[in-house]
Image (cartoon, coloured by chain):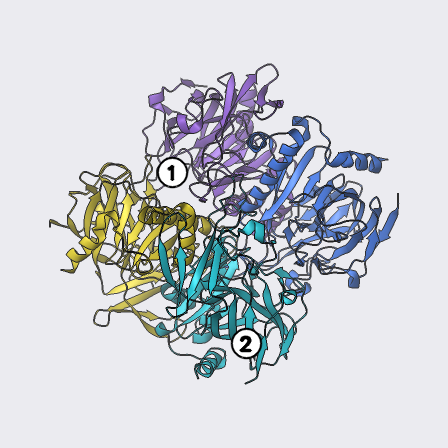
Chain colours: A blue, B purple, C yellow, D cyan
Amino acid sequence: MDVLEYTPEPNDYAWTFGGVAPVRRVKPGTALRLWTEDAYCGTLRSTSDLASASLNMPYVNPQTGPFYVEGAEPGDTLVLHFVELTPARTWGVSTTIPYFGGLTSTDRTATLQDPLPERTWIYEVDTDKQTVGFQAQSSHLELALPLEPMLGTVGVAPAAGEARSALVPEMFGGNMDTPEMRAGATCYLKVNVEGALFSVGDGHYRQGEGESCGTAVEGAMNVVLVVELVKTPGPVWPRIENDEYLAVVGSGRPLEDAWRAGQVDMVRWLGELYGLDKLDAYQLLSQVSEVPLANVVDVNYSVVTKVPKRLLPQVEVYDGIHQQLRQLSLR
Amino acid sequence: MDVLEYTPEPNDYAWTFGGVAPVRRVKPGTALRLWTEDAYCGTLRSTSDLASASLNMPYVNPQTGPFYVEGAEPGDTLVLHFVELTPARTWGVSTTIPYFGGLTSTDRTATLQDPLPERTWIYEVDTDKQTVGFQAQSSHLELALPLEPMLGTVGVAPAAGEARSALVPEMFGGNMDTPEMRAGATCYLKVNVEGALFSVGDGHYRQGEGESCGTAVEGAMNVVLVVELVKTPGPVWPRIENDEYLAVVGSGRPLEDAWRAGQVDMVRWLGELYGLDKLDAYQLLSQVSEVPLANVVDVNYSVVTKVPKRLLPQVEVYDGIHQQLRQLSLR
Amino acid sequence: MDVLEYTPEPNDYAWTFGGVAPVRRVKPGTALRLWTEDAYCGTLRSTSDLASASLNMPYVNPQTGPFYVEGAEPGDTLVLHFVELTPARTWGVSTTIPYFGGLTSTDRTATLQDPLPERTWIYEVDTDKQTVGFQAQSSHLELALPLEPMLGTVGVAPAAGEARSALVPEMFGGNMDTPEMRAGATCYLKVNVEGALFSVGDGHYRQGEGESCGTAVEGAMNVVLVVELVKTPGPVWPRIENDEYLAVVGSGRPLEDAWRAGQVDMVRWLGELYGLDKLDAYQLLSQVSEVPLANVVDVNYSVVTKVPKRLLPQVEVYDGIHQQLRQLSLR
Amino acid sequence: MDVLEYTPEPNDYAWTFGGVAPVRRVKPGTALRLWTEDAYCGTLRSTSDLASASLNMPYVNPQTGPFYVEGAEPGDTLVLHFVELTPARTWGVSTTIPYFGGLTSTDRTATLQDPLPERTWIYEVDTDKQTVGFQAQSSHLELALPLEPMLGTVGVAPAAGEARSALVPEMFGGNMDTPEMRAGATCYLKVNVEGALFSVGDGHYRQGEGESCGTAVEGAMNVVLVVELVKTPGPVWPRIENDEYLAVVGSGRPLEDAWRAGQVDMVRWLGELYGLDKLDAYQLLSQVSEVPLANVVDVNYSVVTKVPKRLLPQVEVYDGIHQQLRQLSLR
């Protein structure tokens, strides 16, 4: 298997999905060893670094990429299998940002209230114990939380000539901020432009469902992924497969629209996989789906609709490519 | 421990939270053995029974109760610990209902489109295997899904003289439709009126998160619960504790408001339990919360915010009443 | 025409729609001369009276009524024609209330931010000039704004045994807070219980569309209205007719659902009046409707869908009862 | 005054705001005589032309432009004064489009229901009477509705390297679909990129507030506008001034967020114009604003917050440029 290593310089970051020239061309079947900067561009390094002084909004979520996938044509299915996600620093960081996050008014859910105060938390990574350390600032509480690395943003160039900020989750993927995007997961995205032009970034050392304050334990990440291409019609919304689940990530506002989008696509998917009409698929979904929130803080909100494989007959998804890649990466 | 057995006749059902005289008076510390009719009032018994012909909307979700809890005063915390939930019939049932459910327009999210077709599914209960059987009608797919009994509705009388349909989830509890309301769970509700006047109903033999089509595997239920009363201030939103989690159930529309409500209450709760100010509690929540949807189909939508106990220092919640009741019920 | 005069004592106020015994019985065709207290129960009388110290939430919007309309049966159309709305005091009052209003977080759209400061404004009524006086507190700006009296709440008892706070707008009417509810308007409401049990209150000396801060220029009101009953099926949502417009008031959350509800009902209404199928009525509505917001601050939000009579062929609505009552009241 | 005439060929249309090279450079103070194609690219010409067969979604709303305004720098205020909007064809057209519009489920508010049927309406323009003719297809109803030309889309290139479809309303303007964008109006937009890169399109011969079915009486338009530039900080959201009103157009989802955004910006604007602090401005807005919906059908919904000049002291807005341009254009 071909392996491409790539670590961007700050000038190499992409800030949008679409509208950016590719940094590399890759063939399907290639493994990529990538480095991604954290969402804050590495500018927050201590509890005295506050977001409003350090960040140059909206230039956050620097993307590693985009990569041009040879042979990828509009309508195809791009397959990204995540082999390894490993912290590239010994600390992660989270922060409140004025008028950003889920439990504050924002530029979109605008009110006349003052913003919440700013505060920055540094989480030390303990590689042996595989934990990150939470330290309260208003008390002595210290907690070792499990390290659970994931990528906030994985996306391709949008359709119809659009270019979207790396803060946006949409049909093209992007800033979905779901803990499901972890090592062992395979992500399926519909190709909108020649070469697909995918990029990744926004590593999280761990994140709660919903990403309440707007930021996870943000950290630079070493990413190993395999790129594949399937010439069958790509999904409307991003799909994720792992050993236990099939999942669809819907995004939108209000939050119920994000949910509806993912659910309708899962009804379609179950229908195709099991030969069910839409009413039977709707009924089955109603009794088996698990629905964790991803984010309620980004330009669109994201909701994951998951179906447990253990409850369903075994079936080949996208020609069984997840299992193939999984075995490959477990060698 | 006192035990009260109660099985309502059809004339005994309550259709609202509030506005109904109590059926029984109980002392804190009493165990109740109850029977609850299914959401459809038992009218759907075969796949040829369709909702629009059989139901007398909005007279669904018949409630067993209300019960007057002696000594309960406005502001107190009512504690309901669920010891056993056991199917009271050998079959459960689910159905599409015209203009009701999550993936259809409704009387609230109104459109000019025709309704989805009606269909009814019967799920046979296999007591040995502890499963319910899904049978597709558009294919030969049959699935044995785990029996996972829960209660859709648990609530007290609302504040301020309101009476609300048994279809409504709100601060007073009600039709939250969360799979977290299962045996082993303790539910905390703020008392709004003298005697609390709680009722339960809407048993589900299993339910996916979100209750997509609007109905779970609905079934009559035998319910064993213990009633307790704590004279500390009741929670703003319903709280649930089990051996693994602390949870808050927020309800509202749009769905993000249901989420915000539960999250803000969990920030408050974490702050009280661990001596954190709101920013530290917000940060901690952001990295540890699990947020499954409950329902996106009822008068208000409901979202559960859960915090795993394993990630947090051990602490007594409501004087440790959950542990006490749990040991009691495990004897 | 029979005339009934009624001024409630504080003990006579109703705080809910439904769940309250009638204060008077009236025959259709009766004129009522009523007095309504302001939303604050008259407790805010100077700029130093602040809401949080003076109000006993949620005991606001005291209702004059309910009135039992003889012969009114579930499904009928209750007709309330407003002949006169006249300020019953020489001043009105408005205020910010912590965590209440449109440009602040609330108990429903919950955030962790501090509330906005409280401030109270007194508006002197100038009867000669028919104005109310706005006085800024942060500058010397003083403005004489036109007196445009309206009623915030007009409603009947809800269906299905519910009782709802006087803060709620819904299918039964209630706290719609639309400037369309002024003298010269006829309101059509579906009867849900025997006697209809309607009440009115929450007088506004003027109000902007949306009622941004949550309160209008609130004031006690002298109300003259005529009660009629039409034995044709009542409307799903409250309808208002005046000399220039037909209107429907939809309520719900999110705001688009309030809009959708009123629009779908107007499609139905246009279809009935002009023999149009739903597509033609939808098209016509798309090109002629005027859609001012009513409130974006109450338990449900309210949106008005208006169709100008001048653009449409003349047609009898509810047997021409508005024109009849209008001529009556102009004598 | 310099006058630039420009009629694009089909190859000259822009389909996005941003990401497109300018078609012309103009100096501030220039008048432009433009022609804009209709939203359907002129493909719907009779009632038998249906949308799904004729349109190449999302290639609708072809833009005339973008124009590079000399001297325009990020942060400036672009001023576009509309002198004349005149139908460029003798007929306009409207249509239902599957899964598009306000009273249907859509790709965003997704349901499993079938789409509404497609239908196309042709509106003949009567230049003498200044009307457009509605013809029902399910009855003989024919109506002459006033011709009230407006532009659906007016926008500049977005910030932060984004490019957005011509279907999107946002901070940069775009597809706001408000009847306020008519002859006599002055639109203020914040410049995000050098040269501003504004474009216009999507002419409507008339439109109801909300654009219920998703399309107005769409028609090619002759547009005369004057371009000016003010070197003071541009507004957060698009502002419109005419002889009677100051207005802000907020866009977003859910609809209440579109409202909040425009309202908060109007509080800011009133504060600046009259030296009010935010509480006084909030209070004043609450009693004087008029709030018609613009669209509830586009990628973001749009709401207009208007303040009537007649209620407020006279004040110079943007150096009185609207009055200057108005006098100019009335000569």
Q: Position of residue C132 (x, y in %)?
A: 28, 68
Disc 1 versus disc 2: nearer the observer: 2
User: Is residue C103 among the parts visible in the rendering?
Assistant: no
> Is residue A70 found left or right of C109 in the rendered image?
right
Q: Give me the chain letter of mark 1.
A: B
Front residue (pair D236, B26): D236
Q: Position of residue C273 (x, y in %)?
A: 31, 48
Q: Amino acid at mark 1?
A: Pro
Front residue (pair A122, A213): A213
User: In the image, is residue D331 above or below residue C273?
Assistant: below
Q: Amino acid at mark 2?
A: Arg
Q: Give me the chain letter of mark 2.
A: D
Which of the labelled discs sits on residue B158, or is there none? 1
User: Is residue C243 among the parts visible in the rendering?
Assistant: yes
**Label 1 crowding class (10 Å Cα cut-off): few <14, some 14-19, many 20+?**
many
The reply to whether label 1 and label 2 mark residues of one chain is no
Q: Quadrant of the N terminus of chain D?
A: bottom right
Which residue does the numbered mark 2 point to in the structure image?
D33
Q: Position of residue A32 (x, y in %)?
A: 83, 48
Residue appearing at x 58%, y 43% in the figure: A261
Front residue (pair C73, B131): C73
Is the C-beta separation of discs 1 and 2 under 8 Å? no
Residue appearing at x 44%, y 54% in the figure: C99
Determine whether the residue tagged by mark 2 lies in a helix, strand or loop.
Answer: strand
Residue most extreme to the right: A2
> Is residue C109 found left or right of C265 in the rendered image?
right
Q: Quadrant of residue D27?
A: bottom right
User: In the image, is residue A310 above or below residue B193?
Assistant: above
Determine whether the residue tagged by mark 1 lies in a helix, strand or loop.
Answer: loop
**Label 2 crowding class (10 Å Cα cut-off): few <14, some 14-19, many 20+?**
some
Front residue (pair A16, C203): A16
